[in-house]
Image (cartoon, rainbow, N blue to C red):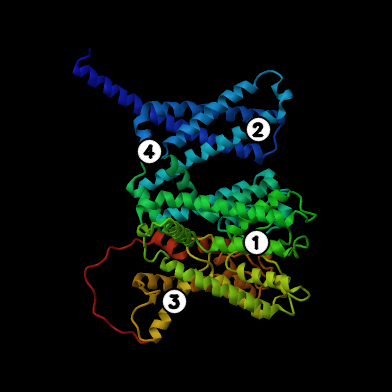
Amino acid sequence: MFSVEVRYRLKQIYRTVKQLVEIASNALLFLASFLAVILIIYRFGFEMPEGYHHEVYFTYRVILRLFLMLGILRFLFNFKLLRAEKGFWVEVLVLLVLLGMTLFSSYIDAPDFVAQHPFWHSLERGLTYIIVLLLSVIQLSKQIFVVLRSRVKAEVLFATSFLFIILLGAVLLMLPNATYDGITFVNALFTSTSAVCVTGLTVVDTSATFTPTGLVILLFLIQVGGIGVMTFTSFFAMSFLSGTSFHDQFVMKNLLNEASLSDIFRTVVYIVLTTFIIEGVGVYLVYLQIQDVAGIGNKFFFSLFHGVSAFCNAGFSTLPGNLYDPLIRHVYGLQVILAFLIIFGGIGFPILFNYVRLFHYWIRNNIKCLLGLRYKVEHQPRIVSTTTRVVLPATLVLLIVGTGLFWIFENHNALEGMSVTGKFATAFMGAVTPRTAGFNNVDMSILHTSTIFLTIVLMWIGAAPMSTGGGIKVTTFVIALKNIWALLKGQDRVIIARRQLTRENVNRAHAIIVLSILWTILAVFALILLEPEATITQAVFEITSALGTVGLTLNLTPTLCVASKIIVSLTMFVGRVGLITLLACFIHSQEAKLYTYPDETVIL
């Protein structure tokens, strides 16, 4: 019907229109998402007249319909491409939900519906806020993830993501509705840094300073900081972003420390889902423990806050005295539950996934044997990784030794007058919490010097790699000890579980230890100069606590001057991101040289 030239022209016009629609759609989605986030901050962060609440709500409904319209346009122009993506049915479900919400909102606009059905009206409002906010986060995550395509170094991306969320958190904590009597920028920045870096050090009384809105903001910062900013954004972006490039996946491979590019998306999903599952179980168990505790107002929020804070190794509490508060001081079941949440969070996602894989392998093969299919049993050698073989024994040793020594040192001091159960629970928590959690269940000011030294050592060693914890990491500590042992035996290699570690692995472990000691020396020296009334023990304890992202204090942090607060904040940031990662942001890595210089020996 049309000539070849006309068809060619029509195709060109179609492609041009399609590109213009995509550009306009992306711009509108970004602006709408940004507006939705700003409006929710305005809605809950500021005092406003009642009429303004309706304006914000109706604006959200307009944004919801905009998402629906642009989603339908995207399907019309890119159906074949979208059909081949892994997130196709998720997007179909999202569109159906948006369509249902649009039809439902039109129905409830009928006269007298609000008066007759107040529950459905409130439910529709709540769902509108949640859905639009969730879609806005997804859209903004896509834009953030696109930054990966600009060839930004993984180290720079990792550090700047934490810095961005810290500054954002400081601004949010300064909102009028976030605090009862206001907060200075330095204190807000310190609190935000402590939450995002899952430390737990505070310069203000959390329960007396922050309103329920402020505590929700704090909880959000802890959750995002615990899992990692890029993990969250990658989870949303890789679920809905079309065509992630090889470079995108390679950057995420470095951030997640994955061995295979094919497992990146699955690892991100597993991390997020595992976190929510463990936290959900923890919240339920905490709730059971405090049901009969009088004096705790909203028990569900208390359980949620402490469950998330424990798994993320943050150490924040909504009570003035933390776990030593008179309300829960003797609820030993609560302390044990929080301790195990801390352990699960600090043991590292790779170890958790490693044992899930081992359990799945064992169950599958046993079922085959029971069904008489022994010939189909698969043998997979070394399912348990070398990292797991290092982390679990080291963690077990630190917990047993730490609990025992704490009990011995404080038996006639902090543990005086407690039952055997109480002494065990308190000593166990005293060994767990220094490994980057920060909950204090005893009066820190009365601890013996030996207990303080034990706590400093545990804080410095820290938790496992790729976990919510900090410190130099147990793997680093074990590798250094193994290297010393190999040196004493005259061996030129480090062997763990019948595997020889690479020289790069050993060098990195020693670099982490040296940099940690150097930063501690410089920060302690600066703190002593700025806080002349502080003892050397207090200074070392506070800096080690900040660098290990622990959160325990000998009552020095609340009295710090502005300059000292900045130093401790910077130390928390360094402890969470890592000194090697930060230095790699500024130092250009050199290509491997194809020549070597003659060997020489320096006298040691």
Q: Residue 351, percent across and down?
A: 48, 62
Q: Residue 78, percent across and down?
A: 36, 30
Q: Which residue is mark 1?
A: 337
Q: Which class describes the residues within 10 Å of circle 2: few (<14), some (14-19), or many (20+)?
A: few
Amino acid type shown at disc 1: Ile
Q: Which residue is mark 4?
A: 85
Query: Which residue extends farthest right?
Result: 294
Mark 1 or mark 3: which comes first in sequence?
1
Q: Is residue 599 above or below residue 579?
A: below
Q: CA distance from mark 1 to mark 4?
A: 41 Å
Label placed on residue 72: none
Q: Secondary structure at mark 4?
A: loop
Mark 2 or mark 3: which comes first in sequence?
2
Mark 1 or mark 2: which comes first in sequence?
2
* Residue 321 in view (yes/no): yes
- The quadrant where residue 116 appears: top right
Mark 2 or mark 4: which comes first in sequence?
4
Of circles 1 and 2, the one toward us is 1
Q: Secondary structure at mark 3?
A: helix
Residue that appears at 69% across and 61% down: 334
Residue that appears at 67% across and 70% down: 554
Q: Which class describes the residues within 10 Å of circle 4: few (<14), some (14-19), or many (20+)?
A: some
Q: Which residue is mark 3?
A: 480
363 or 77: nearer the viewer? 363
Mark 4 or mark 3: which comes first in sequence?
4
* Residue 515 in view (yes/no): no
Q: Which residue is mark 2?
A: 123
Quadrant housing the C terminus:
bottom left
- The quadrant where residue 205 appears: bottom right
Q: Secondary structure at mark 1?
A: helix
Q: CA distance from mark 2 to mark 3?
A: 57 Å
